[in-house]
Amino acid sequence: MTYEEAVKKCRDAGQEHVLKYYEELTKEEKEALLTQIGETDFTVTAMIKDKEAATRKGKIEPLTCLQLAQIEQEKEQFLKTGTQAIREGKVGAVLLAGGMGTRLGSEDPKGMYNIGLTKDVFIFQRLIENLMDVVRQTDTWIPLYVMTSDKNHEATTAFFEEKEYFGYCRDQVFFFRQEMAPASDYEGKVYLEAKNKISTSPNGNGGWFSSMAKWGILDKVHEAGVEWLNVFAVDNVLQRIADPCFVGAVLEKNCAVGAKVVKKSAPDEKVGVMCLEDKRPSIVEYYELTDELMNTKDENGDPAYNFGVILNYLFSVSQLEAIMAKKLPLHIVEKKIPYLDETGQLVKPEVPNGYKFEQLVLDMIRELPSCLPYEVVREKEFAPIKNKSGVDSVESARELCRKNGIGL
Ligand code: UTP
């Protein structure tokens, strides 16, 4: 993009300030800035004017969950079907590791965090160890697609190299970057994080499938004959990945997607809950759960919205391809965004100072015809690390690892 084109694009978008330092820049820095302006979609900031649009909900109704007792009854068949699908190479895993982990507050990618006490136990290592259980059980390598972002790609790939993929087959690990979105102040003016760089952040956990397509990873999925992708978050150190019983249940029940869920610890626990929205599978976030919904009971007298999602989904690849052309809505998230102040100094704010724009996995689910919520035992499969201490923290995850006999 030429300077003149950049001026026009920025002026039209009300973002001329991003060229404020242009004259001070070196030739290379100027080029970098012009390229970034060319690639940036400033229109996302327009959503700030209609913040409610993305969160507007349809009619919410309960979605029946496959609970532990039912799973136990059909376990044999589920295991058989799931194991066969894995052995036939139909199942791949997608590790969502593009997030910034701001609450944990480490400069490194979250997966590099060491939760060990007497030895090194990195989060990435825990996940690979869990996946290895299934590799051994099925005698099959499961392709692992790892989503990073511009902010952590080099550090993540170098770490896997350094640690020799924690014993995983390196030919079966594929990295790809997720797309970035600009970050802005509350009025929608994008921030600068350097004199030649607009402040950007990863565009949310819903961008993984389009990013896979963009970087040619989807071609590899097809080449390998993978038909199902198990998407999971980096921060749950008890995460069971490519779990044969879960895979089998989703296949047997003929659903487009399966979602692992846990029974909520309290009615107002801060987790999203599976539901139907205008008769389609969806997730109602904890802050959208009205008292009326919270108190609704099912036919057994149990809370009807009782199962929280843990960011572990099994998606049908063909079903995702069928909805790929649909643009996912963007959600506005208030965050702390480092920025250049009036004097050109970088400031790292202590409190939120603007918005990031994110796509979410839940909006992919809403586009699909059917979803199977599948209950797992909370203490065995859910130990998320979001914070340094307290709820969902390094401390609570360590305690859960200990209870599951995992040496740290
Ligand atoms: P979170 O929503 O907990 O966000 O991510 P985060 O970035 O890890 O942490 P905070 O909110 O800044 O403290 C849930 C999962 O989605 C991935 C994360 O890596 C994590 O596995 N994620 C999130 C992405 O891959 N990309 C994103 O843009 C956001």
Image (spheres, grey):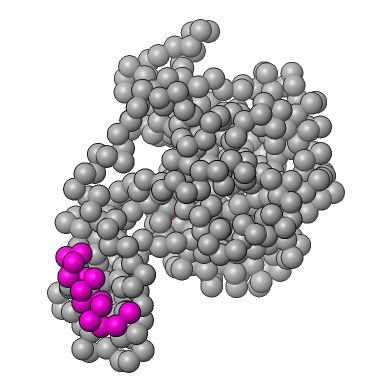
> Could you tell me which residue is drawn at 21 percent across and 77 percent down?
7
Q: Position of residue 154 (x, y in %)?
A: 54, 72
Q: Is residue 338 left or right of residue 21?
A: right
Pick the residue in front: 312 or 262: 312
- First to last magenta residue range: 1-14
Residue at image location 59% in from the left, 69% down from the top: 157
Q: Is residue 4 magenta?
A: yes
Using residue 355 as the reference point, say whether residue 219 is left or right of it: right
Q: Residue 56 in the image: x percent, y percent? A: 30, 34
Taking the image as shown, residue 293 lies to the left or right of residue 251, namely left
Q: Which residue appears at 62% of the width and 57% of the height?
A: 218
Against 30, residue 329 (above or below) is above
Check the picture and name the quadrant holding the N terminus: bottom left
Residue found at x 65% / y 22%: 68
253 falls in the magenta region: no
The reply to whether residue 250 is in sight is yes
Q: On screen, 87 above or below 96?
A: above
Work out which residue is located at the far left of the displayed protein and give it.
342
Q: Main secondary structure of the magenta part?
A: helix
Coordinates of residue 317 in the picture (x, y in percent): 62, 45
Residue 80 sits in quarter: top right
Q: Position of residue 147 (x, y in %)?
A: 55, 59
